Image (cartoon, rainbow, N blue to C red):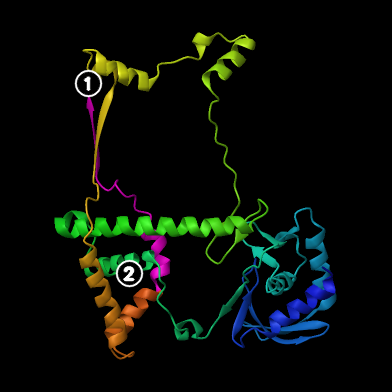
Amino acid sequence: MSFSVNWHTLLEEADELPSDAVLVTPLSHTPFRISETQEHRIIIDYVEKDETRPLQREQFETLFRRVHDEPYQEFALDRLPPDAESFAAVWSLHPRMEIDEDAGIIRQSDLETTTQVSTTGDGDEETERTEPDLQVYSDALLLTDALERHDVEPFGDIETDTLVDLYTMLSDVQRSANDLRKEVADVILSRLHHDQPVSGQFGSVQRTARRQRSLKDDETVLNALEAAGINRERVTSVDRDKVDDALEVTELSETDLYDIESTEYVHKADVDEETKETRLQGLKDRLVASDADDDEVQELQDEIAELEERIEELTSFDSGASYHTSSATE
C-alpha cells in the first residue's frame, strides 16, 4: 500500500480523535494534542509547555519508509532523530502501525493495533455498561463482594466456613476464567500469522509452537535402534502396567515395588448453586433498584468497573493447592 494511502488514513484517524485526546511520545513520555490536520502537515500542541509545532508530511513519509524497509518492518525508537518522537506517536494512530515500548520499536502490523492515546475527560465513567453473559463475570462479582465483606489478612484469623466459601469461589473463578481464556486464545491464534509479539493495552501475546513427542510402536523403535548398533536391553525398562498386573497375582505388597508418597490437599466437594445465585441476584438487584446517585449503588458500580483489573490477580490462586502437606511412607 502506498504512502499516500496510509497518509490519508492517518489524517482521518487524527480527525476522529476527541478534542481532549492526548498522545504520549514513546521515550520521553511527553504529552501533546493534535490541534489541526492539513493536507501536508499535522499541527500539535504540547500539554506541559506553551509550544505549537507543525509536523510535516515529508517527515512522516521518511519514518514510514524506514519502518517499511526494515526486514521485519520494525524500527528501533532509539534510532529516531532528535525531536522525532512525536512523529512515531502520531503514526501509532494508524490501524496498521504500533509502538511496542518494551521492545523499543515502532512496527507495521498485519492486525489493527492500539495507540498511545489517553483522554482527560470522564468518557469512561459515562460509558453505559452492560452485564456480560459470562460465567466468569458472575463468579468474579461474587468473589469481589466476599473479599470486600471480610478482612482476608491474615487468613489464620478467618472462620473456617468463611474460608470454605472463599476457596469455593476462588476455584469457580479459576475454572471459568481459564475456560474463557482458552476461547480467547483460539480466536487470537486464528489471527496471528507470524511469531512477532502483538500488543494490547495491558500486555502482548505471541504465537508459539510447542513440540510434543510420542514413541512409535515398540518393534519399530527397537528395530531402528538395533540397526544403529544399540542393544535392546539398553532401552527397555519396567512396564508399570505389567507391574500392577503382577501385584494382583502375587503376594507382593505395593510397598515392595513402589516408593509411596502421600499428599494431602483441599478438594472442592460441592457447590451450593442456589445460594450463589441468590446472593448474585441480590447484588444485581441492588444495582438496578436504587437511585443512580445512591452511595451504596455507586460503590457497587465502582466495584464492577474495577473488576477487570482484579480478575488476573484473583485467578492466580491455584485450585487444590491452598492447603498442602506431604508425608512419606517407607
Extent of the magenta region: 306-330
Q: Horizontal placement of 170 versus 5: left or right?
A: left
Q: Are marks 1 and 2 in contact (CB under 8 Å)?
A: no
Say which of 43 and 214 sits in front: 214
Please report the residue visible at 36 percent of the width from the left and 22 percent of the height from the top. Answer: 241
Q: Tag 2's secondary structure?
A: helix
Quadrant location of the C terminus in the rendered image: top left
Q: Is residue 53 visible?
A: no
Residue neighbourhood size for the residue with mark 1, other residues' Cα within 10 Å, grouped as few (<14), some (14–19), many (≥20): few
In the image, residue 207 above or below residue 212 = below
In the image, residue 118 above or below residue 290 = above
Q: Horizontal placement of 264 versus 127: left or right?
A: left
Instruction: Identify the image quadrant of residue 187.
Output: bottom right
In the image, residue 92 above or below residue 239 = below
Residue 330: mark = 1
Please report the residue visible at 28 percent of the width from the left and 22 percent of the height from the top. Answer: 259
From mark 1 to mark 2, how far is it between C-alphas? 47 Å
Say which of 118 and 326 sits in front: 326
Q: Horizontal placement of 108 versus 322: left or right?
A: right
Say which of 128 and 73 sits in front: 128
Residue 213: mark = none
Mark 1 or 2, nearer chain start: 2
Magenta span includes 121: no
x and y percentages locating residue 29 in the rendered image: 61, 71
Q: Amino acid at mark 1?
A: Glu
x and y percentages locating residue 169 in the rendered image: 28, 60
x and y percentages locating residue 307 in the rendered image: 39, 70
Q: Amino acid at mark 2?
A: Leu
Quadrant location of the N terminus in the rendered image: bottom right
Please report the residue visible at 82 percent of the width from the left and 58 percent of the height from the top. Answer: 69
- Residue at the disc numbered 2: 141
x and y percentages locating residue 230 in the rendered image: 58, 10
